[in-house]
Image (tube, rainbow, N blue to C red):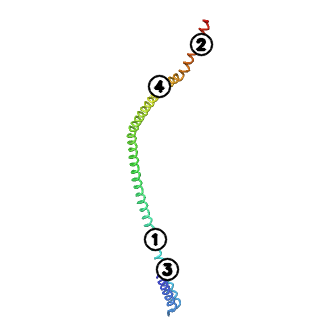
């Protein structure tokens, strides 16, 4: 749409120039008229250019000011958020430390109590082992006594024979001496 409008304006300018050139005036008057119109157009263009420059500078300054405001607002917001997060983290750290100290305080008696229970169980086990060892030793002594009695009973016939032989020999020796 803008292209069509631009061609329309260009056509209008070309038509105006042609009309001035073919007007029933003298060359000097036409040139003066064209020069006046060109100077007037140049002045108007300079006026609009200056206005555009002023508006551009004003727009630029406004954009810079808004940019600084947005930066400052974002910076303040970030600082506030950081401060809140830092405070929250410090609170959580303090609560965690308190909880750890509390657990440590509660755990120490439990550990000591469990330790005492374990020592009592170990001592009871030692006592049972000592009693079992003593019972095994007594049982072993009884077994040895029975075994030695069994050995004596098994050796009794041989011992009786030896004793009988010794008595017979002694009797033989007495007879031989008596003879």
Mark positioned earlier in the residue sequence (3 or 2): 3
Distance from disc 3 to disc 4, alpha carbons, whole Å, reads 141 Å
Distance from disc 2 to disc 1, alpha carbons, whole Å, reads 155 Å
Mark positioned earlier in the residue sequence (3 or 1): 3
Q: Position of residue 123 (x, y in %)?
A: 42, 31
Nearest the viewer among 91 and 154 is 154
Q: Secondary structure at mark 2?
A: helix
Q: Mark number for residue 56? A: 1
Q: Position of residue 171 (x, y in %)?
A: 58, 11
Q: Mark number for residue 139? A: none
Tell which tag, 3 or 2, sits nearer the viewer. 2
Query: Badge 3: few (under 14), some or many (20 or more) residues near its Cα, within 10 Å?
Result: few
Tell which tag, 3 or 1, sits nearer the viewer. 1
Q: Which residue is mark 2?
A: 169
Q: Which residue is mark 3?
A: 42
Q: Which residue is mark 4?
A: 142
Q: Position of residue 73 (x, y in %)?
A: 40, 60
């Amino acid at each position: 749409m803008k292209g069509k409008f631009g061609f329309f304006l260009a056509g209008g300018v070309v038509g105006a120039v042609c009309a001035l050139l073919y007007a029933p005036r003298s060359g000097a008057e036409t040139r003066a008229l064209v020069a006046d119109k060109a100077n007037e157009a140049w002045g108007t263009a300079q006026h609009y250019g200056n206005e555009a420059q002023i508006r551009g500078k004003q727009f630029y300054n406004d954009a810079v000011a808004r940019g600084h405001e947005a930066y400052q607002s974002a910076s303040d917001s970030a600082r506030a958020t950081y401060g809140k997060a830092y405070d929250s983290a410090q609170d959580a750290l303090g609560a965690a430390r308190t909880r750890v100290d509390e657990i440590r305080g509660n755990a120490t008696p439990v550990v000591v109590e469990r330790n005492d229970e374990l020592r009592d169980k170990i001592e009871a086990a030692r006592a049972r082992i000592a009693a079992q060892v003593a019972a095994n030793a007594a049982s072993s002594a009884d077994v040895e006594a029975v075994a030695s009695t069994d050995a004596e009973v098994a050796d009794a016939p041989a011992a009786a024979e030896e004793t009988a032989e010794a008595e017979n020999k002694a009797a033989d020796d007495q007879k031989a001496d008596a003879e």
